Amino acid sequence: MSKALASTGRLGQGLVLLTATWCALGARPGEATSGPPFRAVCTVAKVTGVEAVALSPDGRRLVTAAGDGVATWDASTGQRLPGGDRDATGCTRLAYAPDGRLVAGAIVAPLGVVLLNTRTWRRVRTIPGQPQEGLLAWLAGWWYPPEGCPTHTDTVTCLAFSPDARWLATGSRDGTVRVWEVTTGRARGVLLGHGEAVRGMTWAPDGGRLVSHSYKAIIQWDARTMRPLTQWRDIPTLIHAVALSPDGRHVAYGTTAKQLFTRDLATGQLFGPQERGGLLNLDLPMVYAPDGQALTATWSTELLTWQGASAYRPTYQKAHASRLVDLAMSRDGGRLATAGRDGVVKVWATGWRPAAPGPGPANPAGPRR
């Protein structure tokens, strides 16, 4: 019996939240252990310089950010649709609002965030940044500390709408997370604590908490008080990718040491690690199926999926000819979108269904000893 199976003893109790190992059952990167879990729906070729993708909540519309700005596509046929923002040529991140009415884009030059109406594709709001360069940037921490600045001073690296679409959270290389009121563009608060570039974040399903991460820390915030609830800085190696379980109870993350962990957000209890895991793509998201029983991440040009009872033996599915640059999921979990350095964007049917009421994902690997 493999070490991974022996350490759990409860193979059928749902997904092991990233505590499985890629190699535990002899799987090797690039080698599929079973049939591909996802079916390609459409391919959009020659999206030059594609940086980011997003899917509408129902998975019917695809949005891309590339060298020719923000564009919109039919996610079933790959046909380009009217609309988008050709002026947003410096857009590097996208987020679709849960109600489908807005798309947020992080712009490098000029620094800031734009909000696009998905019916008219007009900019309804712009949240400008205040870039600092040269000596001013070096002195920023002394003369213009983040808490005293009304907006971001460096590139916005991640975006996330709250579940009710009232708030937009933005993370930046300036080390801050900021929360904005969508209807007015006014700042609700600034979250300080990472001390380095924020790499990703997500809202809990109830909208009352945010989880953000840098390369060295994971912080859970109270979204109402703007204060940290818990934070973990005891991670000895860099954090590559993070996912929050659909019930908001656990956070899963992979590290540069090729270790996979999960942590209970209420108790702080750590599950794992399992050694010899594969190395996830840096700064790309991982996504859970709506019922929490499957999880997909990226490794180089491939999609890795742990699903149900075979979670200990992930499936490798070749997705692109070049390294993946983004991964997005529709709100209903029915579709994924991927983008690669090859300039190709693909939409995949997952076969996942919305979550049914019941207990959340289990942690059959047991606590860390």
Image: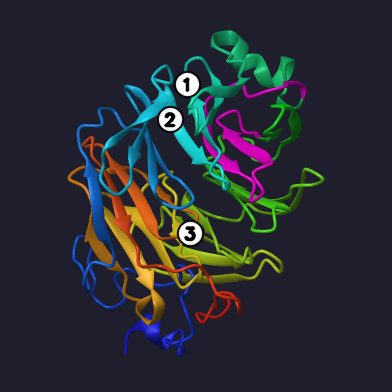
Was residue 191 drawn as part of the magenta stretch in this picture?
Answer: no
The disc label shown at residue 108, or none:
1
Total number of numbered labels? 3
Dot 1 or dot 2, earlier in sequence: 2
- Residues tagged 1 and 2 counted as in contact (Cβ below 8 A): yes
Query: Which residue is most to the top?
Result: 135
Q: Is residue 161 above or below residue 304?
A: above
Secondary structure, mark 2, is strand
Q: Is residue 216 above or below residue 356?
A: above
Dot 3 or dot 1, earlier in sequence: 1
Nearer to me, 195 or 43? 43
Badge 1: residue crowd in 10 Å (few <14, some 14–19, many ≥20): many
Check disc 3 and give the amino acid type: Asp
Q: Position of residue 62 (x, y in %)?
A: 37, 42
Residue that numbered label 2 is attached to: 92
- 142 left or right, relative to 62: right
Residue that numbered label 3 is attached to: 332
* Rendered residue at 32%/90% (across/down): 1
